[in-house]
Amino acid sequence: MLASRLFRIVAGVETTAPELSIPAEKSATGFRRRTAESAIRAFFGSNAFVAIVVLTLITIFLFREGFGFFSQNLANLRLYRQAGLEYVDIIRTEADKQTALSRQLGDIRLQQMRAGADQAALEKFDEFANKFGEQLNGLLSDATDQAQALRETMLQLGSHAGASVIETESQDEPSAAAATPAGNEAEQMATLRSATDKFAQIADSMKAQINELLAAPPALTSAKERKAFAKWKAEVEAYLKQLPAVVERLRAWDPNKPVPAYRAITSFLFGTQWITASFWQDWYGIIPLFVGSLMVSIVALVIAVPLGICAAIYVSEVASSVEKSLIKPYIEFISAIPSVVLGFFGIAVLGETIRAISRASFMQWVPFLPPVVCSR
């Protein structure tokens, strides 16, 4: 019994020894694998930590600059009102409307010329268009100069130290500051506000002159021209009808009306203009930027999603092993490149290439491409 037990123990040791030697070899390989994996994890983990630190610093910087931006934007909005720039923009809006109506007359004349109208009809139409005129441009020019002079005076007196952008521009241009007319803010504001009576007089004379013109419209040959002129006439009548309300708005305008602090935020979040480095007034409305980014994203998705899905289906289900070995490394390589780098490549390389191709002579059949300018 004892001998049989000893033989069994020896046999068990002999059979288990090879089994124990195999995990030892595997353990060495596994150790090397774990070492490589730990090195890779440490590398990417350190990069992730650096990325988190950089993003944190960027966030702190953006918040700090954001608070400074909103305070500066509020100061500019208050200066915009108290210096009379808001008052002048009321006049500017009406002058722009009149300019747009004059431009519509030019379009109607172009249609008449393309329709083959004779020279006498074109001359009569030109006489009609010249009498319509643009009477508000002179008043707008004078009011613009007066408002700019008032703004320079207020900045020199230190009334708006927070308007750093405009103040810096004024310091960089001493000649413009030296040309500022003498007089205090009240006198300059009174001079500017006198434009209300001038606007009312121009509106009355313009209304009488335009009504006289509309009573004897020019002769138009085609139905398309008559339809366009009827539309223009309706817009002119609506324009003349709202001029008395504009006069009352100019009279009710108050430069001392306070601008609430929340306007600095709402004008940024809901503003429809993004105008910087302007001689008149800078506007920071995020709506144009948001809409532009959204439209670009939609166009990119429309192009990229079908191509990406089809490419994925081809690589996964259709491509052979040789094709997969060639395609997959390139896909993984491109996916590792940051999207900012790809965007810069698109602007610097593809954008310039497309621009050069669009200016070629053989691409001039495309209607929205710029025309080729031939230099002699």
Image (cartoon, rainbow, N blue to C red):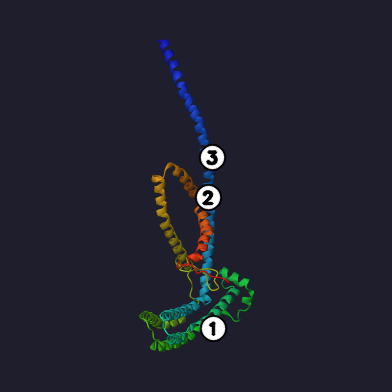
Q: Is residue 296 above or below residue 282?
A: above
* Res 3 seen here: yes
Q: Tag 3: residue type?
A: Ala
Residue closest to the eye, 287 or 357: 357
Q: Provide residue 100's location: percent of width, then percent of height.
A: 45, 78
Classify mark 2: helix, strand or loop.
helix
Q: Nearer the viewer, mark 2 or mark 3?
A: 3
Badge 3 density bin: few <14, some 14–19, many ≥20, Cα 10 Å = few
The front one of 19 and 165 is: 19
Q: Looking at the picture, how far across and down is residue 159, in whole percent?
A: 57, 73
| Residue labelled with disc 3 | 39
Local secondary structure at mark 3: helix
Residue at image position (63%, 77%) is 178
Which residue is identified by label 2? 51
Q: Could you tell me which residue is drawn at 52 percent across and 53 percent down?
A: 55
Report which quarter residue 122 is drawn in.
Answer: bottom left
Label 1 crowd bin: few (<14), some (14–19), many (20+), radius 10 Å? few
